[in-house]
Image (spheres, helix red, strand yellow):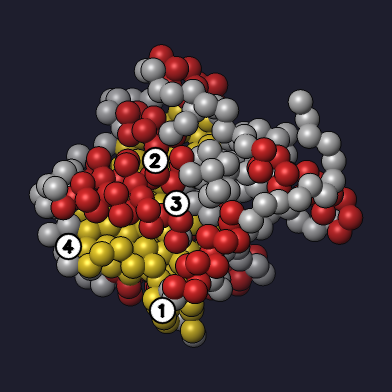
């Protein structure tokens, strides 16, 4: 038995490649790294890897996390610049005894020493998004942080080994050095091969307040189905934050247990995810929260075609100058 689940529709090509590895009796670690690299390499996904949207200084700083649910090896990078595949650096760091989470210059130094591929991750398209957003903020004084997404995945292979991993460029227009939930074990991801794994996407600052991925795995360990565990964790954190702080950011999660059963939950409109199992080719679902219950609907061909059209539509520059 094998399976994979991932946040957002953008993971579908990666999951398709990962599934092939699992089908050929490859390991969960290779399947998940291959799947996430596919998302990192595709320039039109503006919240992960190459083409990811920059911070307020127009630099693309990337976060990624990786955990092995059998050995509990864990590695992560935060605010790393100019490397093509942060997920591979996170996996490599998981093999270290200490120094498993490196940020900024330290992470770059490690990656360089280990021979990882350098790459300028700021695309011309991302620069256009940046300048248009600068103009928008000036004219409308809106908050810059909206509409972003992390790729997070959980995978189980034929040997019942489970891996969870994430990769993101974080919040568009974030402060230099800001690190979200994605490289934080327990928040952006968590996995225990004896139980299952989970991963999160949304507003990192709020997801971290609930250590939401650990919470979901804990709930599964207590006997909850992954769907129940996801709904309980999201609804509880959503309510707590509204009660204590009067507001809550986007919270969306996916999970899979060690039987290949899966679940997903959200507190927003329009969260999509991808799932595949041994008997099921990858399917994209859209989910919505109706009074605490998350209802999943298979994305139509029209929705899928429209998504690709939107993300690849040429952009027009509206403001500012492109910095040399
Ligand atoms: N969840 C991604 C971030 O907040 O950076």
Q: CA distance from mark 1 to mark 2?
A: 27 Å
Label 2: which secondary element: helix
x 49%, y 74%: residue: 302
The numbered mark, 3 or 1, whose residue comes first in the sequence reads 3
Vertical side of 309 occupied by 56: above or below: above
Label 1: which secondary element: strand
Q: Which residue is mark 4?
A: 278
Residue 249: percent from the left, percent from the top?
60, 63
The numbered mark, 1 or 4, whose residue comes first in the sequence reads 4
Question: Left or right: 55 with respect to 88?
Answer: right
The numbered mark, 3 or 2, whose residue comes first in the sequence reads 2
Q: Which residue is mark 1?
A: 297
The numbered mark, 4 or 3, whose residue comes first in the sequence reads 3
Residue 275: percent from the left, percent from the top?
32, 64
Circle 1 crowding by C-alpha within 10 Å: few under 14, some 14–19, many from 20: few
Vertical side of 14 occupied by 79: above or below: above
- Note whether ligand 1 is within 8 Å of mark 3: no
Which residue is more in the foreground, 148 or 188? 148
Mark 4 and mark 3 residues within 8 Å of each other at the beta carbon? no
Which residue is more in the foreground, 118 or 233? 118
């Amino acid at each position: 038995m094998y399976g994979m689940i991932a946040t957002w529709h953008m993971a579908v090509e990666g999951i398709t490649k990962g599934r092939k590895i699992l089908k050929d009796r490859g390991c969960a670690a290779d399947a998940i790294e291959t799947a996430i690299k596919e998302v990192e390499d595709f320039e039109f996904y503006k919240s992960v890897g190459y083409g990811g949207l920059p911070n307020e200084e127009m630099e693309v700083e990337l976060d990624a996390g990786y955990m092995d649910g059998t050995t509990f090896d864990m590695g992560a990078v935060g605010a790393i610049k100019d490397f093509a595949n942060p997920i591979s650096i996170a996996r490599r760091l998981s093999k270290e005894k200490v120094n498993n989470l490196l940020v900024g210059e330290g992470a770059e130094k490690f990656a360089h020493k280990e021979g990882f591929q350098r790459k300028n991750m700021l695309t011309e398209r991302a620069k256009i998004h940046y300048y248009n957003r600068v103009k928008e903020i000036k004219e409308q004084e809106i908050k810059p942080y909206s509409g972003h997404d992390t790729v997070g995945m959980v995978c189980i292979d034929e040997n019942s080994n489970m891996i969870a991993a994430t990769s993101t460029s974080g919040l568009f227009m974030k402060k230099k050095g800001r690190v979200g939930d994605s490289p934080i074990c327990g928040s952006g991801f968590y996995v225990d091969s004896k139980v299952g794994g989970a991963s999160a996407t949304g507003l990192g600052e709020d997801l971290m307040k609930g250590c939401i991925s650990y919470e979901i795995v804990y709930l599964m360990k207590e006997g909850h189905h992954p769907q129940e565990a996801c709904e309980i964790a999201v609804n509880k954190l959503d309510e707590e934050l509204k009660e204590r702080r009067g507001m809550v950011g986007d919270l969306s999660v996916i999970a899979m247990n060690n039987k290949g059963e899966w679940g997903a939950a959200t507190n927003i409109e329009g969260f999509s995810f991808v799932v595949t199992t041994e008997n099921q080719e990858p399917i994209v679902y859209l989910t919505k929260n109706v009074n605490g219950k998350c209802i999943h609907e298979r994305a139509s061909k029209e929705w899928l075609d429209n998504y690709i059209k939107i993300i690849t539509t040429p952009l027009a520059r509206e403001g500012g100058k492109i910095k040399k």
